[in-house]
Amino acid sequence: MADITWSAFDKILNSFDISLDDEKLDKLVKYHKLLITERQRLNLYSLKDNEKLIKYHFVDSAVVVKLLPENRVVADLGSGAGFPGVIIKIFRPDLKVYLIESKHKKAVFLEKVILDLDLKDCIVLNKRFEEIKNIKFDIIISRLVASLKKTLKWLISLDTLKPEMLILYKKTRVIERELKESERLIKKAGYQPKEVVKFRYEHLRLVRSLLILEKVE
């Protein structure tokens, strides 16, 4: 199935009350071209995803932007090709965004994206999450990277650097099960469930769940 047009993308965003202006569109087009050009050389994503970069990955990355408080420091955990961190930065220039990617080739690609798109306050960290020291993240976002249990164990290891909010992309059919299985670990990590936000992608017949955990004061 072919990807969608930018006008169709705009309509989908409007259905989520997200606006797309010329400046954002210009950056998205440049980003899309970089992804297509560098995909195979750097193994950024699977070939089948070429046909759904906009309608799936771009849409899926953009929906979170309405949930983020202003002027925060955000970490995209396991950024890969830049989903959702690059998209978040394009739509929310007020945020300082760290793209955390342990694989060197992908980290170099992300550096090129930042340079070519002229993204200010967007920083690549070519490290494993547990290697990062002395950076205070307000929000950590993880899109389809690790299980809730594994992410919570990372948070426990952070000690005083725990972010105020954790947002995890999850498949709808597993979200409730993971929440129930991780109740004690969530509490041990110093968090509590805030809400589960569900987005219905009519053009894909898909429902995405975003689990939001907030730090207990």
Image (spheres, rainbow, N blue to C red):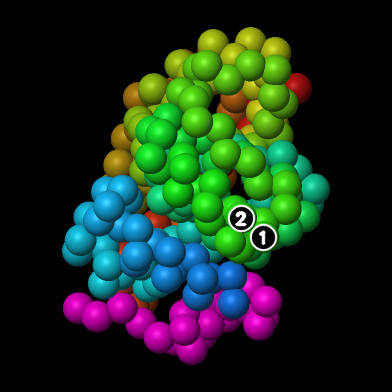
Q: Secondary structure at mark 1?
A: loop
Residue assigned mark 2: 115
Question: What span is colored magenta in the figure?
Answer: 1-25
Q: Secondary structure at mark 2?
A: helix
From the viewer's side, name the closer residue of 84 and 38. Answer: 38
Q: Is residue 33 above or below residue 138?
A: below
Q: Does residue 19 belong to the magenta stretch?
A: yes
Q: Position of residue 217 (x, y in %)?
A: 75, 22
Residue in the picture at 59% in, 77% down: 26
Residue assigned mark 1: 118
Q: Horizontally, is 175 left or right of 21 in the view?
A: left
Residue in the picture at 52% in, 16% down: 131
Instruction: Specify the quadrant that holds the N terminus.
Output: bottom left
Q: Residues within 10 Å of mark 1 (few under 14, many from 20)?
A: few
Residue in the picture at 72% in, 53% down: 120
The number of discs equals 2
From the viewer's side, name the closer residue of 26 and 75. Answer: 26
Q: Check residue 203 in the rendering and tell me which mark sits there, or answer none.
A: none
Label 1 sits on what residue type? Asp
Rounded to the nearest angstrom, the CA distance separating label 1 from label 2 is 5 Å
Asked whether disc 1 touches disc 2, contact meaning CB atoms under 8 Å apart, the reply is yes
Q: Examine the rendering and report whether any part of residue 57 can be seen.
A: yes
Q: Position of residue 156 (x, y in %)?
A: 54, 13
Q: Horizontally, is 52 left or right of 198 in the view?
A: left
Q: Quadrant of residue 175?
A: top left
